[in-house]
Amino acid sequence: MKPDREAMAAAVRDFLRAAGLPLDSDPNLVETPERVAEAWASEFLDGYARTPEEALGETFPGPADSSGELVVVTDLRFQSMCPHHLLPFEGRAHVAYVPRSRVVGFGRLGALVDCFAHRLILQEDLAREVASSLARVLKSPATACIIEAEQSCLRIRGDRQRDARTHSEAYEGRLREDGALRRELWTRLSALRR
């Protein structure tokens, strides 16, 4: 289903009026409902219009002599919206997989993260969706998605933990079960932080 921008703008207009804001007399608010609707429809929620298969795009034959080596792409920047308060969170995703017979372009891993990040989603679910989709689409025997983020819900509401960072991990296949392979992944990630 496509977003109904007119209905979204009307809902934003109603929300702002209910908040007691002077929509008609404040020139900064006159077109706000339409701007908000457009931003949400085309940027914050556009992930619903894409499938993981579309995000990953064309696949290519994997290395013929591969024996289960990890492919790791780190620091994939993303932004998303929390479904609980509709507040943003942003951070970096680290994605890893072991190719079976097919690989994808490195940039497509960022597109996969955005496919799910541009939805209303919890950080934990974002990591799970990326790892499980990568395993399913590429038939990879081992996948992981590790996310570090800054949550507006945590930073600007409630206790206002301004310096807090949140971490989520999701593993599929051998990376869920194989301690040595997971240690290898974390060794690589740790080496990048030095």
Image: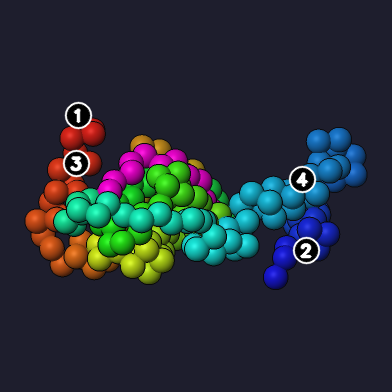
- Specify the segment rendered in magenta: 71-82
Callout 4 touching callout 3 (CB < 8 Å) = no
Point out which mark residue 194 bears: 1
Callout 4 touching callout 1 (CB < 8 Å) = no
Q: Is residue 74 magenta?
A: yes
* Separation of residues labelled 3 and 1 (CA atoms): 11 Å
Point out which mark residue 4 bears: 2
Residue receiving disc 3: 188
* Separation of residues labelled 4 and 1 (CA atoms): 42 Å
Tag 1 or tag 4, which sits nearer the N-term?
Answer: 4
Q: Amino acid at mark 1?
A: Arg
* Separation of residues labelled 3 and 2 (CA atoms): 45 Å
Point out which mark residue 81 bears: none
Quadrant of the drawing holding the N terminus:
bottom right
Q: Amino acid at mark 3?
A: Arg
In front of the other: label 4 or label 1? 1
Q: How many marks?
A: 4
